Image (cartoon, coloured by chain):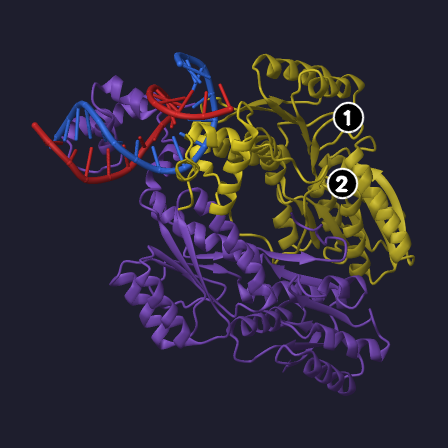
Chain colours: A yellow, B purple, C blue, D red
Amino acid sequence: MGVTIRQIAEAAGVSRGTVDRALNNRGRIRPEVAERVRQIAEEMGYKPNQLGRALSMSRNNIKIGVILQGAETPFMKEVMKGIEEAGAEVDNLGGTVLIHTIEHQSAEDVLLAMEKMRQEEVSGIAMVPLEAEEVKKEINRFVEEYHIPVVTFTSDVEDTKRLCFVGQNGVQCGRAAAGLMGELTGGKGRVAIISGYSTNTSLSSRVAGFQSEIKKKYPGIKIIGPEYCFEENALAKEVAEKIFKDVPDLEGIYLTSHGEEGVCQAIAETGKTGQIKMIANDFMGRNYELMREGFIHFLIGQDARIQGYEPVMILFRLLFNGEKPDREKLFTEIYIRNEYTIPERRR
Amino acid sequence: MGVTIRQIAEAAGVSRGTVDRALNNRGRIRPEVAERVRQIAEEMGYKPNQLGRALSMSRNNIKIGVILQGAETPFMKEVMKGIEEAGAEVDNLGGTVLIHTIEHQSAEDVLLAMEKMRQEEVSGIAMVPLEAEEVKKEINRFVEEYHIPVVTFTSDVEDTKRLCFVGQNGVQCGRAAAGLMGELTGGKGRVAIISGYSTNTSLSSRVAGFQSEIKKKYPGIKIIGPEYCFEENALAKEVAEKIFKDVPDLEGIYLTSHGEEGVCQAIAETGKTGQIKMIANDFMGRNYELMREGFIHFLIGQDARIQGYEPVMILFRLLFNGEKPDREKLFTEIYIRNEYTIPERRR
DNA sequence: CTGAAAGCGCTTACAG
DNA sequence: CTGAAAGCGCTTACAG
């Protein structure tokens, strides 16, 4: 139990309100008094009790809005868990989290959601943005005109006034895959990239990171592709089959996105399961099983949960404590897993 | 802002104290009244506000003791950070964390520390135990006689009444290394194990896991060793040199514990840097650099921070909320990193 | 068995 | 500029 505001008040011979004004720079206090109180607080080693603070502040009710796009994907469902976790925590601290989910990508819906949030008088917004001029403008307007801070997550829009971004470094993710592929193949042979969409910026970053690092560190490897499968298994299978036909001695596949099942089926049908080294992404769907069955050699993944959790907490810490994030981009860790490091079911 | 105890009291036509007694089964209440209050609370969707609860409970001051062994090692220093983080959180919630560090392993010191904790009237203990009959007995006595719950971390003593254990699954860690080594070597050639102490149970588990998995999944690999280097670089270098002499075509080294620098020096002197595949443990010391320099191909690590954080929080949740851990053994995740997944400096 | 009151540490109108 | 008081939601002696 630490020093309380009451003890400081007694020591300084003033009221608790005065101590509060001094310590929190609220003005309406004689500078000398403020200074003296601060000094005494310092000497007594005062640390504000967050509990008292939060309970008292809970009369204000800090409201945080979250706008989620592509809510129906497995990845976003994981992110959602993180948001809900943060929501529970914020709730406990007397705040509220408002969630608005958008099924598919749509700039219009995003704008509508933002407007709705503003009407609900949120004091901060965490959102998955979208590369669209209207959206960027609206983010800037929220920050500058309405003074509502915005944190982006999962996707970023760099040239805006958003407070910070929480998500993966796609290039680094591709590099990690390159390092693994180099070791898996002994640094030689032909390796194919199968990606999702050529238009998706985070997937392109993975591809770019992979290509550049292979070129730099494993010049003995020849890259095929990227080919695109639009994250669909049927198409992924066809793409893989075509590659196997064209490149019978293929050593490895880097799959940047979904379509795992399709590729694995194609591999199974060649009878070369385990020989063709495969690196895939994300710890969801049947990916762990495919790893256990020997199709996937390494899985690279990100912590989806934290991408939901952190943005909300960053805003809460800002609004509650005035604490600012220490970096503009918070990259989530890149996890490498093999079949022996599949985590137990979480609580 | 949710439903409060006051609202329930009004709805039920009783006092707030009565609602509290009903909802928290404190007795001294007519069963019918209790039942009715619970029903109303349920209907109104009551969720206790942790803030009010904590602030009020902070008069009790839950005190948690932590006993740390081998406090001078880099690993334990990381663990310490986690303990301090939990300490700050517990502090905020009105509790106290008492830390007692023991430099070297000593059963006697552990017993003394435990006794000291008891005199300080802690309501729970988190500790790094030690395979000694006296210590085990004392743990049981604390739990059964004094009703002070004990959580072990980092090392475990299985056959005791300790509440639970937080730490690494050593066997699984060894298996993960085996999987990596199999891929690095293409499943053939000779591979050496260099371990720390033959007497250290967690290192032995790693060795055992590695050996059994190699035998099972990569029968083409022949294992040399384990040799022991007592976690000393000079000795590690000698051991490695001897192995290189005996086995000139060595493909890989699995180093279960410290001595990295020594082994790497020996490798450098053979001029086969990067060709001899090496898997080492722990994200500390110069290990990241050695990875960047091409000596270490994969690092396997555990989250040291969480091994300090969780035990304290488990006890706090137990004492504060009556929440019991859901498993008896909480294995920390096993992280695999290559040079591309070295995390940025944490805050 | 039940209620009224005090208290946890902080913030915030309201008077003056 | 300063103080006294009320209040955040809960728990806990104390009376009765």
Residue in front for this viewpoint, D11 or B256: D11
When asked about the image quadrant of residue A307, the answer is top right
Q: Residues within 10 Å of mark 2 (few under 14, many from 20)?
A: many
Residue B173 rendering spot, x and y as whole percentages: 59, 64
State whether residue B326 appears in this view: no
Instruction: Please state the chain letter of the residue tagged with numbered disc 2 in the rendered image.
Output: A
Instruction: Please state the chain letter of the residue tagged with numbered disc 1 in the rendered image.
Output: A
What amino acid is found at the position of numbered circle 2 in the picture? Lys
Disc on res. B59: none
On screen, residue A156 above or below C14? below
Q: Residue at x 83, y 79 (%)?
A: B269
Residue A221 rendering spot, x and y as whole percentages: 89, 56
Q: Is residue B31 left or right of residue B303?
A: left
When asked about the image quadrant of residue B119, the answer is bottom left
Q: Residues within 10 Å of mark 1 (few under 14, many from 20)?
A: some
Q: Is residue A39 left or right of residue B182?
A: left
Q: Residue at x 37, y 32 (%)?
A: B52
On screen, residue B225 above or below A35? below
Between discs 2 and 1, the one toward the N terminus: 1
Disc on res. A237: 2
Residue in front for this viewpoint, B270 or B84: B84
> Which residue position holds label 1?
A160
Q: Is residue B223 left or right of residue B313?
A: right
Residue A7 rendering spot, x and y as whole percentages: 40, 39
Give the Cα separation between the discs numbered 2 and 1: 40 Å
Residue B49 rendering spot, x and y as whole percentages: 38, 31
User: Which secondary structure, mark 2?
Assistant: helix
Residue in front for this viewpoint, B142 or B183: B142
Q: Residue at x 76, y 39 (%)?
A: A236
